[in-house]
Image (cartoon, rainbow, N blue to C red):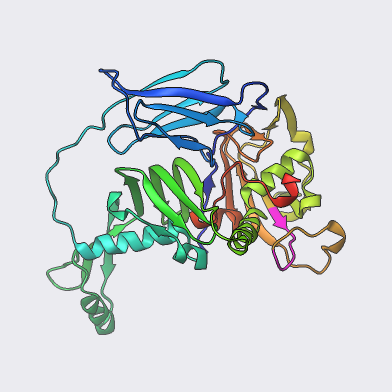
């Protein structure tokens, strides 16, 4: 099974705002100070954002946003600007640079290969399940793909094998003079970037997401996929009550046993109450035998600021995350875990210190999920300021 390991890079806060709850500023073009209208200004990974007016000005309500948070300024004709915002004391004066138009030699590529790249990217980025298939990238022409190749040699052992290779009609196959073997280039990865922000429709969750994709890579041998970018969620909150309720039910389904849910439960010290159990594979005796044992993560947590905990001393270790949920995916109490089949994920710590925050985000900490938590595509992604109905009460 392919393990999708997603680096959690959604950035949000250290403390809730008190007092002034509006962030204001002006966006101008670097070099001439001319205002830049229609730029999108938003807090990364949230639903809080706005388009600048004719004078390049914006005002963002930051009620409920945790600071420091990453502010993103995005415009099709300009380079994306990101900066940390710690408070709202002063009006921001932001300059963005015109995006350089890189002129390069036009390479005629196999149209079928681009379609194959797009199909693979959709499955890996959006997801291969029903939600992933329903999601759409509205401007796929903005995607740029690249692959690395290694040369492979295949010995032809019989006539059946020879026919199979011939019928495959691979364009890059080179036959040996005596026909005893073939060589060909084999792709080892798929990389993608976007020339302009992607517009992604998530019809099941009721969001349109603006994705400033900086990097994407899947490595076949390792079975891993990772991506980094900036996300702005815009909810489709209009319509009748039935439509809104349908979105809310699906958002709750996406929330439970998500990285957001797990990390919020971990921060609150309420893993079991939220259906989670942590285990670790422990070596016994001479190291040849192993056993799966419960793991208590609390001794590794320490407060490092308001609404922030640091996980220390677990670099390089891998934990097993079990989630016990009901048919709707909602967490079961510990008393009902017996004879239940949990959903399994993996948690890997890449750094000696990893920060988690009250809202379920990690800043730039290297926490990696695999298994069920890691396999979810963007079609299951929620903004970091999402709250369930129960949390809103």
Does the rendering let one see residue 143?
no
Q: Quadrant of residue 77?
A: top left
The spot of residue 37 in percent (x, y) is 34, 31
What is the residue that sits farthest to the top in this orientation? 90
User: As rendered, which of 303 and 219 lies closer to the eye?
Assistant: 303
Position above or below: 220 against 231: below
- How many marks the image carries: the answer is 0
Residue at 55%, 57% in the rendered image: 205
The percent coordinates of residue 93 (x first, y second) are 41, 18
Q: Residue at x 76, y 55 (%)?
A: 275
Q: Is residue 289 left or right of residue 238?
A: right
Q: Is residue 86 shown to the viewer in this render?
A: yes
Residue 146, image x, y percentages: 29, 50
In depth, the one of 194 and 165 nearer the eye is 194
Q: Position of residue 50 (x, y in %)?
A: 46, 36
Write down the quadrant of residue 197 in the picture.
top left
Name the main secondary structure of what is drawn in magenta.
Answer: loop
Residue at far bottom of view = 160
Horizontal arrangement in the rendering, residue 102 relative to residue 327 (left or right): left
User: Relative to 5, does residue 98 appear above or below in the rendering?
Assistant: above
Question: Magenta region: which residues?
Answer: 321-328
User: Is residue 301 depicted above or below 279 in this figure?
Assistant: above
In the image, 325 versus 202, the foreground residue is 202
On the rendered structure, is 352 left or right of 208? right
């Amino acid at each position: 099974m392919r393990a999708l390991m997603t680096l959690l890079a959604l950035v949000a806060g250290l403390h809730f705002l008190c007092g002034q709850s509006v962030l204001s500023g002006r966006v101008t073009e670097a070099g001439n100070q001319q205002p830049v209208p229609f730029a999108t200004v938003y807090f990364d990974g949230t639903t809080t954002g706005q388009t600048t007016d004719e004078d390049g000005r914006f005002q963002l309500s930051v009620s409920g946003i945790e600071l420091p948070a990453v502010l993103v300024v995005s415009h099709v004709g300009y380079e994306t600007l990101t900066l940390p915002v710690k408070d709202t004391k002063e009006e921001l004066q932001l300059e963005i640079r015109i995006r350089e138009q890189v002129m390069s030699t036009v390479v005629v590529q196999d149209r079928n290969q681009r379609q194959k790249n797009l199909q693979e990217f959709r499955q890996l980025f959006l997801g291969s399940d029903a939600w992933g298939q329903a999601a759409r990238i509205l401007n796929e022409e903005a995607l740029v793909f690249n692959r690395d190749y290694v040369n492979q040699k295949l010995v032809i052992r019989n006539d059946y094998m020879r026919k199979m290779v011939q019928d495959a009609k691979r364009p890059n196959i080179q036959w040996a003079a005596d026909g005893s073997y073939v060589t060909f280039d084999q792709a080892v990865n798929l990389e993608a970037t976007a020339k302009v922000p992607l517009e992604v429709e998530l019809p099941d969750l009721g969001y349109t997401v603006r994705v400033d994709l900086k990097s994407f890579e899947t490595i076949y041998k390792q079975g891993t996929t990772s991506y980094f970018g900036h996300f702005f969620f815009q909810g489709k909150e209009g319509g009748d009550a039935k439509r809104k309720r349908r979105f809310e039910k699906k958002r709750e389904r996406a929330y439970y046993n998500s990285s957001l849910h797990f990390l919020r439960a971990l921060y609150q010290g309420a893993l079991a109450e939220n259906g989670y159990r942590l285990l670790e594979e422990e070596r016994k005796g001479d190291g040849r035998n192993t056993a799966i044992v419960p793991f208590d993560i609390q001794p590794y947590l320490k407060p490092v600021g308001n609404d922030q905990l640091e996980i220390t001393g677990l670099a390089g270790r891998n934990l097993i995350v079990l989630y016990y949920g009901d048919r709707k995916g909602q967490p079961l109490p510990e008393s009902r875990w017996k004879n239940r089949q949990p959903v399994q994920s993996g948690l890997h710590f890449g750094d000696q210190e990893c920060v988690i925050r009250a809202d379920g985000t990690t800043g730039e900490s290297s926490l990696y999920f695999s298994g069920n938590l890691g396999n979810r595509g963007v079609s299951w992604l929620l903004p970091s300021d999402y709250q369930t109905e129960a949390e809103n009460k």
